[in-house]
Amino acid sequence: MPVPQQLARGDRMGRGPYEKSGLIEDTGLPPGKLVKERFEIFYPLEEVEVNGKTVEKPAAYDLDVEVKLTYLPFGTPNSDPFVWKEFTKRVSISQSGK
Amino acid sequence: MNTMILRGGLAAALVLGVLTAPSFAGKAGIGWQETIAAKSGKAKTLAELAKMYDSSSCVECHQEQHDQASKSIHSRSLFGTARTAMTIMTTIENGLMEEPYSGVKSPKDVKVEHLMGCAKCHLPQLADAEDSVAQELVSTLYGWKEARAKKDKEGAKKLEEKLKSVSINCLVCHNRNAITHKWQDGYPKAGVVYGSKDGDHPSDKFPKMAKSPIMDQAIQCGQCHGLGPNLELDEPTQCCTSYGSYLWTYKAEVGQENCQDCHMKNSKLGHNIQSYRDAAMSDKAVEFKAEAFGYYWRDGAKIRPRAVVKVEMLNKAGHSIPDG
């Protein structure tokens, strides 16, 4: 979103039209420009004994990934979210191999 | 002796001036006296302001457009979703009352000029009202808030309706704000509805129609959906910046469509002008693609399985998202 600058000076974000008179940055989607985001999520690991040695193995081999593009005009993601686009997928990794 | 005669002449001219324009300051341009506001004189009550820009007769012939417009938040621009009403009070308390040179120590000190930071867009016709209307609005807002706090649903509803009695209605767009370049195109005249055609208009109150030079142009909307800070005000405010975004990013680098193309025509919403909460707008505004996969990532002897999520978003709107 356009992050408003308080009274058009300094490094503080303004809140309310009476305070806003500039921009610090715009984190929104600019028109016509492809915006790419990449996220990495590590699988949870747990320590297990294998042949007398302690090794780390995945605690789960499936992750349910949920991506939400949320329009958040006011408040917090929990107060008044407007989920614009949504993507869900179960991402699995192999349970055997070298 | 001559000096005394001159003084007498000046006094007579001043008295005449007061009689002919009792409550409306003159403007430099030609024809401003033909505007609705100049002909009516400034409104002294909210009811008078509502009457000055009363567009209830439009529905007699323009039922479809009326029904569409009534679904748009423009039809309750001062109240909004209630958040607008609350923000005006926040502006009074956290803005005006905290600003040492505003002249506002309590809500009772609020004048039209103080409210124009909000009203420039939420109720532009407030500029055509006396300070008594600003006070009536303020007392209505606080009365509504108090009624809500007391769970007085009926009282709150009554005051809510009063706040909704003035809005961005037909006459604001099709008369008052239908001409931006008034020295070039003339001031909008009382009795004229501005749209796409010139000619007679079958209405007692508005017997003429005239082509607005900007009705199908982005600047019509840009009057409110702004460039950035409203620097013409003694205390600048800022809400929407979408017209600025439209000009400097969309027009500069992307395309040639305008506000009306997307929000009225392509969406088929007509006068039901909507934004992100309407599927007709949001579906077209953003292309969204996502993919996800997992693999075993390895850093030397350490193995850390990870999921990778890639998201691509393309904003197809004519302005930054979010904006307003």
Image (cartoon, coloured by chain):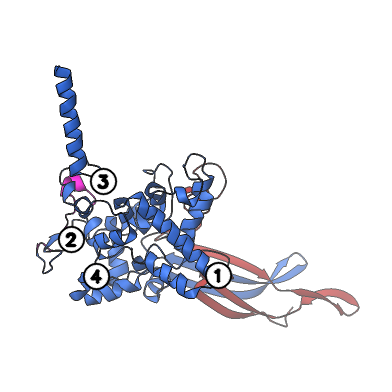
User: What residue is pinned by disc 4?
Assistant: B56
User: What residue is pinned by disc 2?
Assistant: B194
Query: What residue appears at the point 46 percent right and 70 percent down from the top-left corner?
Result: B156
Residue type, numbered disc 2 = Tyr
Regarding mark 2 in the picture, which secondary structure is present there?
strand
Q: Mark 4 Cα within 10 Å, few/some/many (few <14, many 20+)?
A: few
Query: What residue appears at the point 49 percent right and 67 percent down from the top-left corner?
Result: B312
Above or below residue A95? Residue A2 is above
Chain A colour in the picture? red
Regarding mark 1 in the picture, which secondary structure is present there?
loop
Q: Nearer the viewer, mark 4 or mark 1?
A: 1
Label 1, label 3: how far apart the Cα atoms are: 39 Å
Q: Is residue B227 left or right of residue A16?
A: left
Q: Quadrant of the C terminus of chain B?
A: bottom left
Marks 1 and 4: in contact by CB < 8 Å? no
Residue extending farthest to the bottom is: A95
Label 4, label 2: how far apart the Cα atoms are: 16 Å
Q: Is residue B61 left or right of residue A72?
A: left
Q: Nearer the viewer, mark 3 or mark 4?
A: 3
Residue A34 visible here: no
Q: Is residue B214 magenta?
A: no
Coordinates of residue B157 in the picture (x, y in percent): 44, 72
Where are the magenta residues, as a range? B180-199
Q: Chain coloured blue: which letter?
A: B
Q: Mark 3 Cα within 10 Å, few/some/many (few <14, many 20+)?
A: some
Query: What residue appears at the point 21 percent right and 70 percent down from the top-left corner?
Result: B58
Q: Is residue B198 magenta?
A: yes
User: What residue is pinned by disc 1?
Assistant: B150
Coordinates of residue A88 in the picture (x, y in percent): 56, 79
